[in-house]
Image: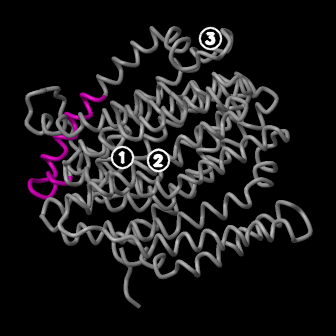
Amino acid sequence: MKKLSHLTRTSIMLGFFFGLDKVLAFVRSIVIAREFRNSITLLDTFNAANNLPDLLFALISGGALAMAFIPLMSEYLTKQNRDAAWDLFSRVANLAFVATSTFAIVIAIFAEPIARFGIVPGFPPDQQQILVELMRLNLIGTVIFSISGLVMASLQANQHFFLPALAPIFYNVGQIFGAIYLAPRFGVQGLVYGVIIGAVMHLLIQIPGLAMYHFRWTPSLDLRHTGLLEALRLIGPRILTMFGIQAMFMLRDNLASLTKQTGAVTSLTYGWMIMQVPETLIGTAVATAILPTLAELASRDDWTGFRQTIEKAFRVMIALSLPIAAVMAAGIHPLVRAVFGFDEAGTSLLTWTSRVYLITLCGYTMQEVTARAFYARKEAWFPFFGVVARLIIYVTIGAIAVIYFKNIGAPVIALAEISLTVEAVFMLVLLNRRISEPVSINGALVRGLIAALIGGGITYGLAVILPGSAVLTALLGMVIGGLVALAIVWVEARLLFKL
């Protein structure tokens, strides 16, 4: 039997751990939802309070740095040596920590006007005050992540994925601890204490990896260092790109607060999380695994291998994501009701919000690869151009939703995420113009659409026709519909084993 390739093994390993992470994330969300199901406004407040700390993390820490930093560190490892790579890592990490801490202090000082005028202008004053307190606490975890995110990127650049894959799991464990043991005692603030504990565990679990690769810290902030200047040149566009992405999350909750719809913020948060389960297993796992390889191929000018790697990833993602989205949308309602324990109005709102998000699943998976392809080529401005186009479309749809469809609320705001599919197509067109031979996805797209129609129809039909518990018939319908869809796209899906 032919051995699986390194990328296939890595993708499967990452998919397994990302899946475990999503299971724990759901456990966390279920515990939190049930703890505060009679205080939906507190859930809205907690979810909205994460936005600005998340923005800071995305811009200055691992979120922005990782994708731009991995290709540069991979080049150092390929063309120089590990000592030079760790020296570069130290300088970037030192700067990230100082910058994150400085901005965190500034945000903590001005938290009240930021919350009142920027994040949730539609919330009443008492709810805004709770949000301010939660946001300040959240910044502690953000500062810790400023180092942990870069440690994750550095280990991935060394082609080590095991400990970085474990880190989010430990982060969720910390949050679950906070939800079960601290929230009953400290209220909603206990949830943030769990976030801080999870951030510490996220960092500590990766420390052995640094020792494994003989990490040496350079205590320097020399801004004239050649490698640091190169890193900043690549990271600058990435910061602007991440600002656009995170701005959409902040805008999402801003728009939700203006609808005055109870549970709108929570439905958008949980609906996005539901869509992110298959997106992480398909898109993030594969894209994370191939980035160091794409960077290495680009550094060797092996553009044929570069295109073939991207094409295989695309065909797998498109063929799987379309039917998965259809099958989940068809069978999700009774599962949402059983898992989250909301009343019928809350269940219906979350169900339709999740369904709308699932429309964007294929676009999300494609964008994961296109962005990394450009970062591997050190063309960091192209993802920024894509996000600008996405932001314009998002703002337009969001504004229309609040002005004309306020009574519908969260599902219409979720529809604004269709802008990401537009971005993914735009990025693919740009990428095809930058490489000698275009990436071909037509066959995967056709088979994926056919599988989505048939698999989704079977799922819905069985859920309605079969007697018995709604949850059991929905699950059975999803399994049978999913298997039929998989048979249709098997030609593409099996490429996962040949990456």
- Horizontal side of 346 relative to 417 (left or right) equals right
Dot 3 corresponds to which residue? 129
| Mark before the other along the chain sequence, 2 or 1 | 1
Instruction: Tell me the distance, in whole angstroms, between the alpha carbons under discs 2 and 1.
Output: 8 Å
- Horizontal side of 49 relative to 393 (left or right) equals right
Is 285 inside the magenta-drawn segment?
no
Dot 1 corresponds to which residue? 152
Answer yes or no: is residue 192 visible: no
**In the image, what residue occupies the spot 17% across and 36% down?**
233
* Quarter of the rendering occupied by the C terminus: bottom left
Answer yes or no: is residue 349 visible: yes
Dot 2 corresponds to which residue? 167
Q: Nearer the viewer, mark 1 or mark 3?
A: 3
* Quarter of the rendering occupied by the N terminus: bottom left
Q: Secondary structure at mark 3?
A: helix
Q: x, y (%) of residue 354?
A: 65, 48
Q: Are marks 2 and 1 in contact (CB under 8 Å)?
A: yes
Q: Are marks 1 and 3 in contact (CB under 8 Å)?
A: no
Instruction: Tell me the distance, in whole angstroms, between the alpha carbons under discs 1 and 3.
Output: 34 Å
Q: x, y (%) of residue 278?
A: 56, 58
Give the amino acid type for the residue marked by disc 2 in the picture: Ala
Give the amino acid type for the residue marked by disc 3 in the picture: Gln
Give the amino acid type for the residue marked by disc 1 in the picture: Met
From the image, give the main secondary structure of the stretch colored magenta: helix
**In the image, what residue occupies the spot 67% across and 41% down?**
29
**In the image, what residue occupies the spot 22% across and 71% down?**
305
- Horizontal side of 144 relative to 322 (left or right) equals left
Is 95 inside the magenta-drawn segment?
yes
Q: Secondary structure at mark 2?
A: helix
Highlighted magenta segment, given as a residue range:
74-96
